[in-house]
Image: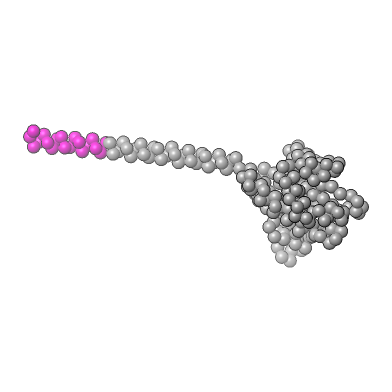
Amino acid sequence: MTKKGNLQQGAFHLEKGKKLEWLMAVILLSAAYVLSREGARLVAAQKAATKVVVLDSGHGGDDPGKIGANGVKEKDINLAIARLLKKKLEKQGILVVMTREGENLSDPGTVNAKVQDLQRRVQLIHKKKPDCVISIHQNSYPDAAVKGAQVFYYTDSKEGEKLALCMQAALVAGLDPANHRKAKGNKTYYMLKKTDAVLVICECGFLSNPEEESLLISAAYQEKLVEALQKG
């Protein structure tokens, strides 16, 4: 073969090699693009599948809530129960947001601390857009014999009513089958009327009842209570 022929053949192979390299680069880039889009889709799907629950521990700070027959403060029991429930729900893959981990959400020295605290809880809930909100509370009544867990929901909320019925049934079954209290609608509680989310208030028991107060501060009973709330 002549020198010219060799040069032409070499140029042909060089051009062919460049085309193959270019083709491989296009294929790799296309594959990377498809994989990145698929990865983004999977991440978005996972995020969409993750349920978000806000746990609201009632009261806090200078607002102790109800004071038990033996001096127990409602705010402390509320937070203890919420922390236990948080751990159980997270094991189910649920994203849990606590409205408070410490005392409350108000600024030190605020004149209307309780109002500011409640407003900030509502703001947090609206920001997180949860699937539902469980507000943990304890009850009280002048008659010390009164006892039993009861769940409240916003009267006009059908979804709230559904959740409350589930929670009430789980609490009765898990804690006291003799408890004849029913889930009840309410339009006056601040957290119920000010939030757009599906929210229920779980009054876990009566601190005014000495027997129930003793149960509510018991680690074993709190475990039973939290299991019932989780099922609900």
> Looking at the image, can residue 122 be seen?
no
- Identify whether 134 is placed above or below 5: below
Percent x, y for residue 225?
Answer: 76, 48
Quarter in which the N terminus is drawn = top left
Q: Residue at x 77, y 44 (%)?
A: 174
> In the figure, is residue 15 to the left or right of 23?
left
Q: Nearer the viewer, residue 207 or 108?
A: 207
Q: Residue at x 73, y 38 (%)?
A: 159
> Looking at the image, can residue 183 be seen?
yes
Q: Quadrant of residue 197 in the image? A: top right
| Magenta-drawn stretch contains 136 | no
What secondary structure do most residues of the magenta stretch adopt?
Answer: helix
Which residues fall within the magenta stretch? 1-19
Quarter in which the C terminus is drawn = top right
Percent x, y for residue 105?
Answer: 70, 58
Q: Residue at x 34, y 37 (%)?
A: 26
Percent x, y for residue 176?
Answer: 82, 44
Q: How many numbered circles does the render carry?
A: 0
Q: How is the image coloured?
A: one colour
- Identify whether 190 is placed above or below 160: below
Residue situated furthest bottom in the rendering: 109
Residue situated furthest right in the rendering: 143
